Image (spheres, grey):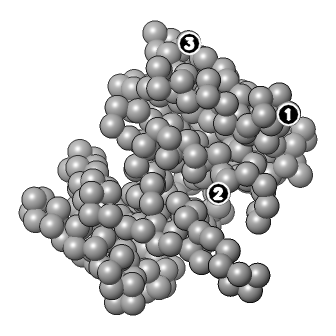
Amino acid sequence: MHNITLIPGDGIGPEITEAMLTAVEATGVKINWERVEAGADVIDKYGTPLPEHVLESIRKNKVAIKGPLTTPIGTGFRSVNVALRRELDLYTCLRPAKSIKGVKSRFDNIDIVIVRENTEDLYAGIERQIDKDTAESIKRITRGASERIAKYAFEYAVKENRKKVTAVTKANICKFSDGLFLEACQKIAQNYPQIDYEERLIDNMCMQLVQKPELYDVLVLPNMYGDIISDLAAGLIGGLGIAPGGNIGDGIALFEPVHGSAPKYKGLYKTNPTALILSAVMMLKYIGETEASERLYKAVADVIGEGKTVTYDLGGSASTLEMGKAIAEKV
């Protein structure tokens, strides 16, 4: 029996979570779900979007999966997602981008993995208002965080039989911060002679991924670039609706879809649950249920490939729960 923390999220979160649970339960893996609440919808109840008992649950169970959580733009509380990563030291954001037959896209056979540093850089939100006309953000990069994310990328490449790791920076301009990240990658790469290593500048990387994505395998990036490139990579495979993710630290992990909470679709049960279900695929593999993980992935691919019971964004008319049930039946 696996004890796993479940955070349904807000917006469309509870709907896609219901579909995910249906699909995962069909694998037969025994899971005790410890359901906890976080996000914008619980502020009135707990006085905070991230109650302490949520963190306690994840620390106890060591594994969690969550639906999307709303983060207001420009105002309101800092991102709960960022807070979870920081509080639990989930320093790796792992985001695979893999083509699925039946999803409309300009590209075929995309298979790229984004390994994003998850704790520092501009994304950490260290900023201040200097005066009414001037704001400042601090881009902090440390050697320790850079070396451990580089090591994760190379270890992942070895474990998953990947051939190449590409470090992505803007070290020609940000010579100290990105320069330090690049230096760390170069140092770690020396320990993995069996893995090809190369470097790209972030602007050039964007162009390369659009022109010839087949040349790339594992990408390792600082936090902000990793966030942007993972959305670009999702675009290559057909959109955020099929883009899963995992936030991983030492002995602890939190899985979630890349997309947001889409509050305007809340309660309509029309949203594609694939990204969260594929995040569950990653979760099952992480907890050692590899065979179940593979069966669930194949079921997702089969349902999308057939195109009969899929949501509107995939060209169908099925509801969120109908698609979840169709995947469960395939499992």
Q: Please tell me how crowded label 3 is: few (under 14), some (14-19), or many (20+) other residues with Cα within 10 Å.
A: few
Residue 299 position by quadrant: top right
The tag earlier along the polypeptide, 2 or 3, is 3
- Judging by the rendered image, the residue that carries numbered circle 2 is 240
What's the residue at 54%, 24% (across, down)? Answer: 56
Marks 2/1 in contact by CB < 8 Å: the verdict is: no
What's the residue at 39%, 84% (across, down)? Answer: 174
Q: Nearer the viewer, residue 81 or 308?
A: 81
Amino acid at the residue labelled 1: Asp
Q: Position of residue 121 (x, y in %)?
A: 46, 66
Can you tell which mark lies on residue 57?
A: none
- Judging by the rendered image, the residue that carries numbered circle 3 is 32
What's the residue at 63%, 71% (across, down)? Answer: 128
Instruction: Classify 63 as above or below 276.
Output: above
Amino acid at the residue labelled 3: Asn
Q: CA distance from mark 1 to mark 3?
A: 28 Å
Label 3 secondary element: strand
Q: Please tell me how crowded label 1 is: few (under 14), some (14-19), or many (20+) other residues with Cα within 10 Å.
A: few
The tag earlier along the polypeptide, 2 or 1, is 1
Label 2 secondary element: helix
Label 1 secondary element: helix
